[in-house]
Image (spheres, rainbow, N blue to C red):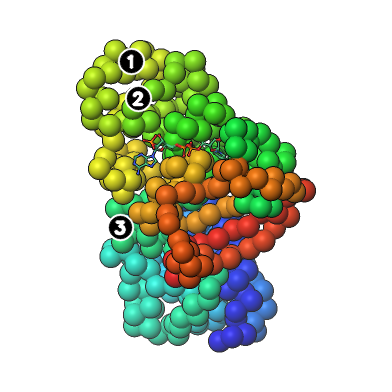
Amino acid sequence: MSEFAHLMRLAARLAVRGHGHVEPNPMVGCVVLDRDGAFAGWGYHRRIGGAHAEVEALKRAGMKARGGTVIVTLEPCTHHGRTPPCVEALRTAGVARVIFGERDPHPQAQGGQAWLRGAGIACEQLSLPETRDLNAPFVKRVTTALPWVIAKWAQTVDGRIATRSHDSQWISGDRSRAMVHRERGRVDAVLTGIGTVMRDDPLLTCRSGRPRRNAIRVIVDPELTLPLDRKVVRTAKEHRTVVTTLPKAFGEKSEHRRALGDLGVGCMKQHSDFKGLLEALRREFEASTVLVEAGGGLTGALLQEGLIDEAWVFVGPRLLADEQAMGPARGRVTERIAQGIPLRLLSVRRRGPDALLHYRFGG
Ligand SMILES: NC(=O)c1ccc[n+]([C@@H]2O[C@H](COP(=O)([O-])OP(=O)(O)OC[C@H]3O[C@@H](n4cnc5c(N)ncnc54)[C@H](OP(=O)(O)O)[C@@H]3O)[C@@H](O)[C@H]2O)c1
């Protein structure tokens, strides 16, 4: 089985190409070998409602798939959804063996392994860290009412996201910022706090590449102080924008709420916790992925509730050496290093002069 690990990793890399197009579906990649073990085809799930990875890869492989082996990152599905079941496509193509990465947690689609074995096709699981990481957002969406949450921040080498006077522009370089702009076009919601809107006046829109989806901008503003001259307000008629505020301010500041409404900004009552807000974003705006671009206040509060799944940390080549400069998250008291929140490093990449550290929380 381990001889297939590099092909499973290749399938996982192919799957990521669907990011932003397929959610809330899973990202899935697939490789087909012919009966002699030679490379015959590849595919990935490109967009929601489109062909599944197996079907695309089998199409590319054509007759070479007969008697061959299929390596796919997720257990082939058994249900008639927007497309026919993949298990039937595999049987029709005459493949001899299927190796899949992760079990399908979806109640309607699972059971592919048993189905294939019942049809006389050898079927085994080859779970790798890469396939587990790839599937984690899908597993979370299927097993909870929450979206997948990515926190992004730019920091100096000594871990500061702004100076003591709140200057933060720019810590990271053009290439890092272009990547963030692109990512905004691949998520369903961009979440920030009023502190960031007041200090940085960001647009929070996708301005690099063609957006794959239109993210709603969500601003946490407990006292409803969002001024009408902010960029997020002035562009709210073109880019959906919502502010969440405490019930008290919601009631007392109805005039300001109306003025924001006239400019296109929706207003939601703040939930008792951020889990409630994230559930509401999933339920009311079908948000399957949320990008958090906030300061230490909001990021810290989300961390406290254990709601962040992934962090993208852009480290710019600068040192402030000022203990009053701002950190990326606050609100915890830790006496010992062992009390810190553990993260797992997924990758380190260079983006021009910056380093991009990609982390996962939990597991
Ligand atoms: N380098 C970067 O990547 C980056 C990115 C974004 C922002 N920044 C910097 O971060 C700074 C702003 O940070 P910030 O912390 O002031 O603002 P923030 O995180 O953008 O917003 C904080 C907001 O969240 C609210 N909040 C925090 N905990 C809460 C809780 N438990 N329940 C309800 N609401 C809660 C706060 O309410 P309360 O006022 O009631 O506490 C406040 O309204 C700026 O200097 C900006 O330049 C840097």
> In terms of sequence position, does the residue under pointer 2 or pointer 1 come before the other?
2
230 and 265: which is toward the camera:
230
- Residue lying at 45% horizontally and 67% vertically, measured from the top left: 339
Secondary structure of the residue carrying numbered label 1:
helix
Whether disc 1's CB lies below 8 Å from ligand 1 is answered no
- Residue lying at 37% horizontally and 73% vertically, measured from the top left: 112
x, y (%) of residue 349? 69, 58
Which disc is residue 256 wearing? 1
- Residue lying at 50% horizontally and 29% vertically, measured from the top left: 197
Q: Report whether 135 appears left or right of 156.
A: left
x, y (%) of residue 81? 34, 55
Marks 2 and 1 sit apart, C-alpha to C-alpha, by 8 Å
Quick check: marks 2 and 1 in contact, CB under 8 Å?
yes
For residue 180, what is the image quadrant?
Answer: top right
> In terms of sequence position, does the residue under pointer 1 or pointer 3 come before the other?
3
Secondary structure of the residue carrying numbered label 2:
loop
x, y (%) of residue 111? 32, 73
Q: Name the residue under label 2.
A: 224
Which quadrant holds the N terminus? Answer: bottom right
x, y (%) of residue 240? 42, 27
Name the amino acid type tagged 2: Leu
Secondary structure of the residue carrying numbered label 3:
loop
Relative to residue 196, is residue 313 depicted above or below? below
Q: Name the residue under label 3.
A: 144
Which quadrant holds the C terminus? Answer: bottom left
Name the amino acid type tagged 3: Thr
Marks 3 and 2 sit apart, C-alpha to C-alpha, by 30 Å
Name the amino acid type tagged 1: His
Q: How crowded is mark 2: few (under 14 residues within 10 Å), some or many (20 or more)?
A: many
